[in-house]
Image (spheres, helix red, strand yellow):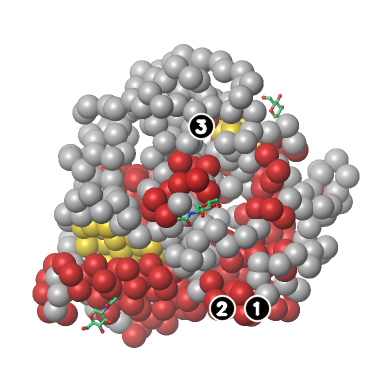
């Protein structure tokens, strides 16, 4: 497969670069000015890459895929909304692919690995209207909220009352703003526009979508971040319910369009991410703050709470739509599996950001990736920039998830 290597590289000034060459057949990429060939071209709509990691053997083939979500699955929508506002449009984002693509990682995202596993090319972003959408469309937008922006604003979010139960110290609040209006309902509206143009009638759409798979989420992480800074405990419970409700409205919407296979991801254990850990100091904190994985208990319990409500809602909807396959994707435990198998999977660093600043866990809101000084070999990190995961982590999480998702998709029927 042809690989384009961008020559328009941009790097933070004064960065020290180190080229670490291969251990295996695959090139390992460090944050270097001299780019190594990418193993796959994420903009190619041609054949999905053949790979030897066994993903394709777990059979479930679709001819189209549609995705709604946030930064964890945006393959280039947000950078097209406003390139100057988002670091994911420039290096070191995309470093492993050889160029920035708008993905908020060093390389491929989980949605890319799902596409591979389902026998599809990488999903093109909706905003890239020069692309072909023969195999589906990605509507996800980095920074998107599960709730409409107006709903959040009506609650006074984002604000900074400071929730001292969860946050210690002062917070780099400049990161806390509504970055995009492309919330879940806006993405659904775009999807509706797309299907009205593409397959037009309900009957025709049903046929057009008969061999498609839909992802609704991961989304809601941004809403939670706003809430952590701006709401008290009791309001927080209500918000969790609202977020889940909004995700389920998304699932209902795609079913109305004609979806018959829907995957609904849960939340990641945010208490294990550098962005959360950074606010705490294990050397000073009470050990009771941490669980057996060394993650922050309080944060993880909110994510787990969200997932429990989501699972119940999915079971309810399944009863309403026995003809539709709805599968919960356990992102929470997929992430934990990275931590528990870190050594075996080659992750030398479980809790620090690869694209780093000098702060605790190599993360700082004031100096996020792009503004950071340098970055380490992302192959050996789980976290890319403190918020999002590395390509390597994404690949392993999808491999983990497929074991349970594939059988539940009832592909033979
Ligand atoms: C893009 O973002 C920049 C920086 O925030 C802002 O000045 C500019 O007006 C934005 N452009 C559009 C088209 O929204
Ligand atoms: C798509 O078509 C349906 C049926 O005509 C209509 O109700 C809906 O508003 C349309 N969607 C958009 C986004 O225009
Ligand atoms: C942060 O990065 C530096 C430079 O690679 C490293 O020496 C340090 O151990 C890292 N800190 C943590 C907490 O990972």
Residue that carries the numbered disc 1 in the rendered image: 155
Mark 2, Cα crowd under 10 Å, few <14 / some 14-19 / many 20+, is few
Residue 370 in sight here = yes
Callout 3 secondary element: loop
Q: CA distance from mark 1 to mark 3?
A: 36 Å
Query: Which mark sits nearer the N-terminus, 1 or 3?
Result: 3
Say which quarter of the image contains residue 159. bottom right
Residue that carries the numbered disc 2 in the rendered image: 151
Callout 1 secondary element: loop
Residue that carries the numbered disc 3 in the rendered image: 92
Residue 61, x across and y down, in percent: 20, 53
Camera-side residue of 360 and 184: 184
Residue that protrudes farthest toward the bottom in the picture: 320
Residue 87's place in the image compared with 27, above or below, is below
Residue 241, x across and y down, in percent: 57, 78
Q: Are marks 1 and 2 in contact (CB under 8 Å)?
A: yes
Q: Is mark 3 within 8 Å of ligand 3?
A: no
| Image side of residue 234 versus residue 197, left or right | right
Q: For the point 34% across and 73% down, which residue is it?
A: 189
Mark 1, Cα crowd under 10 Å, few <14 / some 14-19 / many 20+, is some
Query: Which mark sits nearer the N-terminus, 2 or 3?
Result: 3
Q: In this figure, what is the number of numbered marks?
A: 3
Residue 291 in sight here = no
Q: Are marks 2 and 3 in contact (CB under 8 Å)?
A: no
């Amino acid at each position: 497969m042809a690989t384009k290597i961008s020559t328009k590289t941009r790097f933070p000034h004064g960065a020290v670069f180190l080229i670490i060459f291969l251990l295996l057949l695959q090139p390992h990429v460090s944050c270097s000015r001299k780019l190594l060939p990418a193993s796959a071209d994420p903009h190619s709509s041609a054949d999905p890459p053949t790979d030897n990691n066994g993903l394709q053997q777990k059979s479930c083939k679709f001819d189209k895929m549609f995705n709604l979500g946030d930064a964890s699955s945006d393959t280039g929508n947000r950078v097209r909304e406003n390139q100057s506002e988002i670091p994911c449009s420039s290096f070191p984002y995309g470093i492993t692919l050889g160029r920035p693509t708008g993905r908020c990682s060093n390389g491929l995202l989980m949605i890319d690995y799902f596409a591979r596993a389902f026998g599809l090319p990488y999903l093109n972003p909706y905003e890239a209207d020069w692309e072909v959408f023969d195999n589906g469309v990605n509507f996800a937008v980095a920074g998107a909220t599960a709730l409409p922006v107006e709903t959040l604003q009506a609650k006074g979010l984002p604000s900074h009352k400071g929730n001292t139960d969860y946050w210690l110290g002062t917070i780099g609040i400049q990161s806390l703003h509504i970055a995009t209006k492309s919330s879940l309902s806006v993405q659904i509206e775009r999807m509706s526009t797309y299907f009205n143009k593409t397959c037009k009638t309900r009957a025709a759409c049903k046929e057009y979508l008969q061999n498609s798979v839909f992802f609704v989420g991961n989304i809601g992480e941004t809403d939670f971040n706003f809430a952590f800074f701006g709401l008290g405990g009791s309001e927080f419970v209500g918000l969790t319910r609202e977020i889940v409700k909004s995700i389920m409205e998304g699932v209902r919407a795609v079913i109305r369009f004609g979806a018959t296979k829907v995957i609904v991801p849960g939340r990641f254990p945010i208490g294990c991410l550098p962005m959360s850990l950074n606010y705490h100091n294990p050397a000073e904190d009470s050990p009771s703050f941490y669980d057996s994985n060394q993650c922050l208990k309080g944060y993880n319990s909110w994510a787990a709470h969200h997932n429990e409500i989501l699972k119940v809602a999915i079971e309810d909807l399944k009863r309403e739509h026995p003809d539709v396959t709805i599968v919960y994707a356990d992102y929470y435990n997929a992430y934990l599996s990275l931590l528990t198998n870190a050594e075996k999977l080659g992750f030398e660093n479980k809790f620090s950001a690869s694209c780093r600043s000098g702060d605790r866990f190599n993360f700082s809101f004031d100096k996020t990736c792009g503004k950071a000084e340098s970055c380490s070999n992302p192959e050996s990190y789980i976290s890319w920039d403190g918020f999002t995961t590395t390509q390597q982590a994404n690949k392993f999480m999808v491999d983990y998830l497929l074991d349970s998702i594939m059988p539940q998709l009832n592909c033979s029927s």
